[in-house]
Each structure stands twice: as C-alpha cells, then as structure tokens.
C-alpha cells in the first residue's frame, strides 16, 4: 500500500515541530522518473533566524525500526549550543522511504536503492557547507554508502552501533535469525509489532512510556510497517543475497576514507556487538571511539551521545569545516629540516644482548621439578622468544593485531610477551583479580584477535564467548582442544618457528600493549602503551633505582614481573597465588631471594600486609637471606610509614621505597622511608609520595566549591586539587574510551609563566594526564596524595579530601583501618567515619559509644557518625584502595534506618 508523507503528532516528547519538513524528491535508481515525498527534521531555518554562521551539515540517518525521532536530543542540543555562541551545525535528519513519516512506496528497496534514495534526497535539498554523515543500525550502512559516493562533499563520518561487514561462515545475530526464520518474517515485522517492541527493549533501562510510544507512532498499522519487514529481509546473510555486493562495495570504500571519524558504541547490543565495532576500527583506524559501558543497541537512549557528538565537532572544527576535496594531503615523511628521533632501543634490547648467555634469566618458584624451581637461561629465553615469535607470524599474527594473555606470571608468560612484542602484536593484559565479570568486560571490550592461555583461561573464554583464535600453553588432547576451540599450542608454534626468520620489528610509535586498570574506582579501563613508552619506563626504572645485570629482581607485583629481561637482569616470581597478592608470605620472599641472589624486591601493598603478618614464620636462614636485599619497593598504591617500616625490619639492609604511580604512568614520584619520616613533622595532610622521578612533571588543578578540578594547572604549594602528571612513559591513550581520554587531558595546557623551578623539561610541550587523584604540593615540591576525586566530600564550607582525617582516625588504638565518606546532599555533605576495629567487630553497625568518642576526639573534621565494620571493601590487586563510593551509599542506607548488612 502506498501513502504520502505526513508530519508527526504535535505531542511527542522532545520533538520540536519547528524542525519538521516535507519535500518532494525526484527519485533515483528504480524510482527514476517518480517523485517521492520525504519527511525530515531540519534545523537550517532556525539557525538562519538566529543569524549564526553555519559551518556545515550533519546528515543523520536512522536505522530499523526507528525514525528521525531517534536524533531529537542532538537536534535540540545543537540549536541550544548555537544560541550560546558555539559553532553552529545544521542537522538534517531524514525518515527513510517506507519508514517514519515519509511516503510508503510499496516497492522493494534493497540496500543499493536506499543509498540511491539518500543521494536523490541530498541532490534535491541543498546541504550547507561540508557534510558529516551520521548513522545508526542499518542507517549507518546507508549513511556510509552516501559518504563513499560523495567524497567531494564529505568532511567526516559519525556512527552509532552498526556494521558494514559480516564474517563469512558465522551466523548473523540471533535476534535477526529469529526474525528472518521461515514463517516469522512477516509475522514478527509487519503483521505484529514484535520486532519493533523487541528493538525498543534493547536499552540498559526501560524507556519512558511516552518516548516508547513516540517511536511506535509511525508504525501503528501493518501497512505502515512494510518497511520494517523490508529492511530485515534485505540483510545480506551470505554472498548469494542481492545486497551482498553493495555491502561489500561500501565496506571497501569505507576503508579508503581518510577523514575524521567518530564511533559511539553500546557494547550490550545483541545485534551489532563489539565484533562489528572491531571491523569498523580496522577500516577507520583514525576514528575516535567510545564504548559506553552498559549501553545497549539504542545507545542514543542509553548514553549522552549528543554531548559526545557536539564535543567531537568542537574538537575537530578546523578539519570538519572543510570538505575532503580541499584538505591538503600529507605524505607522512619527515621534512629534512625536522630533527631526527633519538635511537630507539626496544624493550627486548637487553635480551638480544644476552642471547648467548647461559646464566639464569627467569625463575618461577611456583613451578618445581626434581632439581628445584623452574629456571630459564638468557639463551633459552631468547631462543624461545624467537621461536614463538616466528610461529605466531606463521599462523597469521600480524603487527597491530591483539593477543590476550591468560597466563600467570612466570617464564611462559615472559616468553610469550616478548614474542608478541617482537613481531608488533599488541598484548592485552587483564588482572585475574577483576573476577569473571570484570575479565569478560575487559576481554570483550578490547576484542582480541588471538587468545593464549592455560586451560582455566581457555575454559572461561569458551564458556563466556570471549573473542579470538585460541592457543593453549600446553598441548591438549584432541578432544579437549576441540571442546575448547583451541587451534594450536605453544609447542606447535615453537616447532613451526624453529629455524624460521622473525619478521621486521615494530617501530617506537607502534602500539605495544593494553594494560587494564584494577577496576577499584569503576569498570577497568584498557590503557594503551606504544613501544617507545614501554622503553621509556624501562629506562627510568633502570636509571632511578640503579638496576644492573647483577641486581636481580623478586617481583611480587605482577606488572613488574615482566621487566627483568627488559632491564637485562634476572627476575624471580615468588611462590604465591598471583590472582591474590595477599597470599605471598615472608618465607616465600626469602626463598625467592635465596634462589636468585636478588637485591631488589617489588611487592604490592596487599602482599606487604601478609609478608609482615607472616614474618614470625621466618627461620634464621630466611632472615640471613633477606639481609642481602638492598632495595625494597612497595608498588601499586601509596602506603604509610608504619607498614613500610614493618617490612623494612624483615629486610634490614634494604632502603625501602614507596613510588607513586598508576597503570597510566607506572612510576611518577618516589620517596624512601627516611623521606616519609622526615616529612611527617610538616603540617601537611595525606600520604607523602615524594618528588618526581627523572624528567617527570607534576601540577595541581585546584578544586572549586563544587569539588570539581577547574583550576589552571599550577605548582603552587598548599593548593588542594587534582594531581596532573607528565612523563616520557605516560600512556598513549585509553582503549576505545575517547571521552575518558578527553577528560584525562582536559585543560592541561601549561603556560610559559607557569613553569616550575623544578621542571626538568619544557612543561609547555609535554603530554599531561589528569590522574583522578587529589592532593597538594608542599614548599619543597613534594607530592601529598589525599584521596580520589570522586571521594572528595563537598560540604557547605568547601571540598574536603578524606585521607587526612582517615590518618587521624587511624591513630586511635582500637582502629586498624579507616575510611571517611560523605552522606547527604551535594554541597551539604556531612562526614562519617567507618572503621575496622581491633579486635574486629562481629557485625556492621554503629560503633560503641567509647570508640565513637575516641574517634571524634582524634580528628578536627566534624563527624556525624562513626560506624564499625568487620572489613572495609578494597580491591584485590592492592588490598589498599578502599571503595569509598560503595561505603558512602552503604552509610546513607544504614543511617536512614536500613538493615545493617555488610558494605
């Protein structure tokens, strides 16, 4: 049934009728010679009325079964931005033919026809300035088809969950298979609203009833739903489908687009999941990508996509306000006048230097044979790295491809890491302490091409549907390998790689690793390092701690377990459960020192607690071995002088260090135990973490009355604010988290007159990172950490960081550990102390009157309540990062009369 275009009802929430338009368009393709009426939303006239210059047009194309209503938030916010003086972009959001309020044509409209339809529309409706295409779902495909065909007008592309390619041999997503099943297509898409209702349910939270009804509005009858069925029928499931060749043409063309691109994604999408995002990134590697964790298929309803779009437009305005045809092309070759980069020494440089050395390189105390712990020489390690590297290359692992490693620290992991780095593969490392849910989020978010793991990791990969070709560390029985989907083993790769040449090594600017954060302050983030940044980390570590070939490392903190070969010194992993650092004992550290002769020990705070707790089990021989340690580092999170001193008594000849850093920048500052004791007499609050290491730089962005870090980066002492760092080994970016990355570098430009006397390099040219930590600098330039930005308590008198008060409370003899959190409305927050007691309390709730009095007397911060718990919630990796946000919510519930459950 045919029907003319019409306007939407007047009462649809969020839709401004001023922008509704209908136009007759001479048809293209199969519609040649016909007029087709289109309904669309257009902000051009309103921008003209405002008298603002229009930089260009965003051509927005909805998917199936939505309509131009999908873009209402962007339309409204773009006009508001123009009214406030921001650059103005005209939004033209179409209703595709047979969809929304455009004409019903009663014609079969395959993909090529829909691309021709959109071209006919833009030919009839002159678009202002350069054009940026924007599409979602199958509207993404159509918009990209238009983009590929209009290079002279195109300035950029923006995409929400969509796809341009489906891997041969793999079934299409289950909801689409069901909709296309024999006898189901018409029933689910046309005769009933089943497909429509299913799509409207693909959100993280139920849509508002009025919004859901607005999406339904154009599709009240079966005759108006013919286009929905037509779209589903047009999904090219294989090469025999009529739209397959057009989809392939578009996919090929997209890979040729050398323009700014933005992808905003909802990972909880059962239709266009991360596999399709990964394919699009391969085709548009220059794209800015942000995955909105928890968002679904209708990401425009789940996440602030309009804010993201407008921010991206603002950041890229110089490139986007000029069409591709007028943009200068760069050759990518340095001009002869540019200075040459310093020689690059890759991470495996020292390993290559010692490749003929028969001395021990790596020891794994957890793996024992008849002659004791497993030991690998430099020659064995270098040979194994070359063999695995060549084997990986032979089976198709290429530079830039991602390899997820589900292997515990030890010689096997070390060899695999260096083999991957050697051929330019990007290693993906996520801590087992994230748990199954966190690991799944990390692995699926990074979408590796290959997975190398032991049996437990491969079982999880198979069961939970983690992506990637699977490789086992050990050769598995055929039945087991088939059940786990394992294609080969490391032994197979070693056999293949023996005597085979390794490909050309990567460059310093190539991506090398994705390291996931601990997840202690939200979902774990993938931190991307390039080869040059990893090498810079090696160099600063070697220089600052004077690491030589004879030093030897005991690495009870997983990230540093891999640096021994890079530093050219032997390393040993002590006997422990690496997924739970608190299982490390003092005896295990002594045994590792004895086996390796190491003089440097790395431990995480979680490990230190148990090492100190088990010191009583040390034998006289153990204590003698520990006397040879000269340097001891607590790495991962700052710790207090008391715990560091307790560890120092176990290694009496060692200089204890407590470096400050984070996954994004592993070594920022350093302080010794003597330095902590010296600083203790000063009138500063927080944990003193010392001075910047090497050429690292520090600044503070002051907190305003709202608790936001809005101050210009400064080195002024005594100012509470967000800590901003710069370093040659600072991470490159967050993986597929463009908005997070953008926030981390927000307003970090340093003026020439803001340079600090202690700066060791030009701060105005440095890359900076907002850490999310809060603290201050003292008059000597030392950094004091006072908590996390989200944990700042914003009171009526201003923001208060929690750590200072926590330290005061922990001075009470009956308190083992404390957290200070806020309750109540923002800017009227009140402080509450939550403590672990000595001895531990048996149940959570209000502290005893005696303890409450003692805690309140210990601090100058007024406390409205003191609560006691058996154990404070902390992260697994460090056992020191207290989840204050969780405690704040728990305290709110408890003080409001809720049941006193554990936090």
Image (cartoon, rainbow, N blue to C red):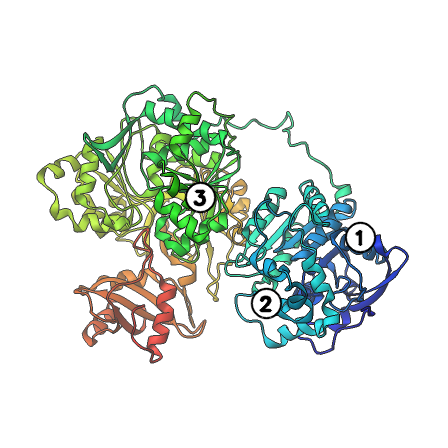
Sequence order check, earlier mark of 2 and 1: 1
Q: Which mark is residue 200?
A: none
| Residue bearing the label numbered 3 | 485
Q: Nearer the viewer, residue 758 or 546?
A: 546
Q: Position of residue 466 (x, y in %)?
A: 46, 49
Circle 1 packing at 10 Å, graded few (<14), some (14-19), many (20+), is: many
Q: For the residues marked 2 and 1, what is the alpha-carbon distance in whole angstroms?
A: 29 Å
Outermost residue toward the front?
183
Q: Position of residue 514 (x, y in %)?
A: 46, 43
Helix, strand or loop status at disc 1:
helix
Helix, strand or loop status at disc 2:
helix
Q: Nearer the viewer, residue 703 or 148?
A: 148
Q: Position of residue 375 (x, y in %)?
A: 26, 30
Identity of the residue drawn at 46% across and 57% down? 702
Identity of the residue drawn at 33% across and 22% down? 379
Q: Nearer the viewer, residue 374 or 333?
A: 374
- Quick check: 601 left or right of 778? left
Circle 3 packing at 10 Å, graded few (<14), some (14-19), many (20+), is: some
Residue 689 in view: yes
| Residue bearing the label numbered 2 | 198
Q: Nearer the viewer, mark 3 or mark 2?
A: 3
Residue 525 in view: no
Sequence order check, earlier mark of 3 and 1: 1
Which part of the image, by quadrant, shows the C terminus?
Answer: bottom left
366 versus 317 height, above or below: above
Q: Nearer the viewer, mark 3 or mark 1?
A: 3
568 versus 705 height, above or below: above
Q: Nearer the viewer, residue 428 or 885?
A: 428
Q: Nearer the viewer, mark 2 or mark 1?
A: 2
Q: For the residues marked 3 and 2, what is the alpha-carbon distance in whole angstroms?
A: 32 Å
Q: Which mark is residue 116?
A: 1
């Amino acid at each position: 049934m045919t029907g003319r275009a019409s306007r939407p009802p007047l009462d649809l929430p969020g839709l401004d009728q001023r922008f509704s338009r209908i136009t007759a368009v001479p048809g293209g393709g199969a519609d040649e010679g016909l007029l087709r009426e289109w309904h669309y939303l257009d902000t051009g006239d309103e921008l003209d009325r405002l008298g603002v210059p229009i930089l260009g047009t965003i051509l927005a194309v909805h998917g199936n079964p939505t309509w131009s209503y999908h873009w209402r938030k962007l339309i409204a916010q773009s006009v508001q931005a123009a009214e406030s003086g921001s650059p103005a972009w005209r939004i033209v959001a179409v209703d595709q033919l047979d969809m929304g309020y455009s004409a019903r044509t009663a014609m079969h409209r395959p993909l090529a026809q829909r691309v021709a339809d959109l071209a006919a529309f833009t030919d009839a409706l002159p678009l202002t300035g350069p054009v940026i295409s924007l599409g979602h779902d199958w509207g993404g495909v159509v918009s990209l088809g238009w983009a590929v065909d209009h290079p002279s007008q195109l300035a950029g592309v923006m995409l929400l969950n969509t796809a341009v390619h489906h891997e041969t041999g793999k079934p299409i997503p289950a909801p689409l298979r069901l909709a296309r099943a024999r006898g189901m297509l018409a029933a689910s898409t046309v005769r009933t609203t089943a497909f429509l209702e299913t799509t409207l349910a693909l959100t993280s939270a139920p849509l508002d009833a009025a919004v859901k009804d607005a999406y339904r509005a154009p599709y009240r009858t079966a005759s108006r739903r013919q286009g929905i069925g037509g779209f589903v029928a047009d999904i090219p499931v294989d090469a025999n489908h009529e739209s397959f060749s057009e989809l392939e043409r578009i996919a090929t063309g997209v890979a040729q687009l050398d323009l700014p691109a933005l992808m905003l994604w909802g990972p909880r999408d059962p239709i266009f999941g991360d596999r399709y995002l990964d394919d699009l990134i391969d085709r548009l590697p220059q794209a800015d990508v942000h995955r909105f964790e928890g968002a679904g298929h209708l990401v425009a309803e789940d996440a602030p996509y309009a804010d993201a779009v407008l921010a991206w437009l603002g950041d890229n305005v110089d490139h986007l306000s000029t069409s591709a045809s007028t943009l200068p092309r760069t050759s990518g070759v340095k001009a002869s006048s540019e200075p040459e980069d310093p020689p690059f020494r890759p991470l495996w440089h020292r390993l290559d230097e010692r490749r003929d050395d028969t001395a021990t390189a790596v020891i794994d105390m957890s793996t024992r044979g008849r002659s004791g712990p497993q030991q690998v020489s430099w020659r064995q390690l270098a040979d194994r790295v070359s063999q695995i590297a060549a084997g990986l290359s032979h089976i198709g692992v290429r530079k830039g491809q991602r390899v997820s490693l589900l292997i515990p620290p030890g010689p096997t992991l070390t060899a695999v890491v260096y083999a991957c780095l050697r051929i330019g593969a990007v290693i993906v490392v996520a801590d087992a302490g994230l748990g199954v849910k966190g690991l799944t989020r990390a692995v699926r978010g990074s979408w590796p091409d290959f997975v190398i793991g032991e049996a437990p990791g491969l079982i999880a990969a198979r069961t939970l549907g983690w992506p990637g070709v699977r490789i086992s560390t050990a050769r598995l029985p055929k039945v087991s390998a088939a059940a786990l989907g394992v294609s080969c083993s490391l032994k197979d790769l070693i056999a293949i790689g023996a005597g085979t040449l390794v490909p050309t090594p990567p460059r310093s600017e190539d991506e090398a690793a994705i390291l996931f954060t601990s997840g202690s302050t939200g979902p774990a983030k993938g931190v991307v390092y390039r080869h040059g940044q990893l090498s810079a980390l090696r160099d600063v570590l070697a220089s600052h701690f004077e690491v030589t070939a004879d030093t030897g490392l005991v690495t009870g903190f997983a990230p540093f377990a891999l640096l021994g070969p890079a530093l050219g010194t032997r390393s040993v992993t002590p006997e422990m459960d690496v997924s739970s650092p608190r299982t490390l004992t003092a005896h295990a550290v002594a045994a590792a020192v004895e086996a390796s002769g190491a003089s440097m020990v790395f431990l995480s705070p979680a490990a230190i607690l148990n090492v100190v707790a088990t010191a009583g089990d040390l034998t006289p021989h153990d204590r003698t071995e520990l006397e040879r340690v000269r340097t001891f580092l607590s790495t991962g999170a700052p710790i207090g002088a008391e715990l560091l001193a307790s560890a120092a008594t176990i290694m009496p000849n060692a200089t204890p260090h407590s470096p400050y850093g984070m996954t994004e920048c592993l070594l920022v500052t350093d302080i010794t135990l003597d330095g902590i004791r010296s600083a203790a007499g000063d009138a500063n609050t927080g944990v003193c973490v010392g001075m910047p290491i090497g050429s690292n730089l520090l600044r503070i962005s002051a907190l305003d009355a709202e608790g936001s870090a809005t101050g210009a980066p400064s080195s002024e002492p005594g100012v509470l604010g967000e800590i901003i760092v710069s370093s040659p080994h600072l991470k490159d970016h967050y993986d597929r988290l463009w908005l997070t990355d953008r926030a981390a570098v927000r307003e970090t430009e340093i003026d020439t007159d803001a340079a600090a006397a202690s700066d060791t390099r030009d701060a105005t040219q440095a890359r900076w990172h907002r850490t999310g930590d809060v603290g201050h600098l003292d008059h000597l330039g030392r950094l004091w950490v006072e908590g996390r930005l989200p944990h700042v308590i914003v009171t009526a008198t201003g923001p208060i960081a929690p750590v200072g008060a926590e330290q005061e409370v922990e001075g009470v003899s009956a308190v083992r550990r404390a957290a200070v959190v806020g309750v109540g409305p923002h800017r009227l927050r009140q402080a509450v102390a939550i403590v672990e007691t000595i001895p531990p309390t048996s149940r959570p709730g209000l502290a005893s009157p005696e303890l409450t009095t003692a805690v309140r007397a210990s601090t100058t911060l007024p406390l409205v309540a003191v609560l006691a718990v058996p154990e404070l919630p902390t992260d697994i990796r460090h056992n020191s990062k207290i989840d204050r946000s969780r405690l704040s919510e728990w305290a709110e519930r408890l003080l409001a009369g809720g049941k006193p459950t554990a936090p």
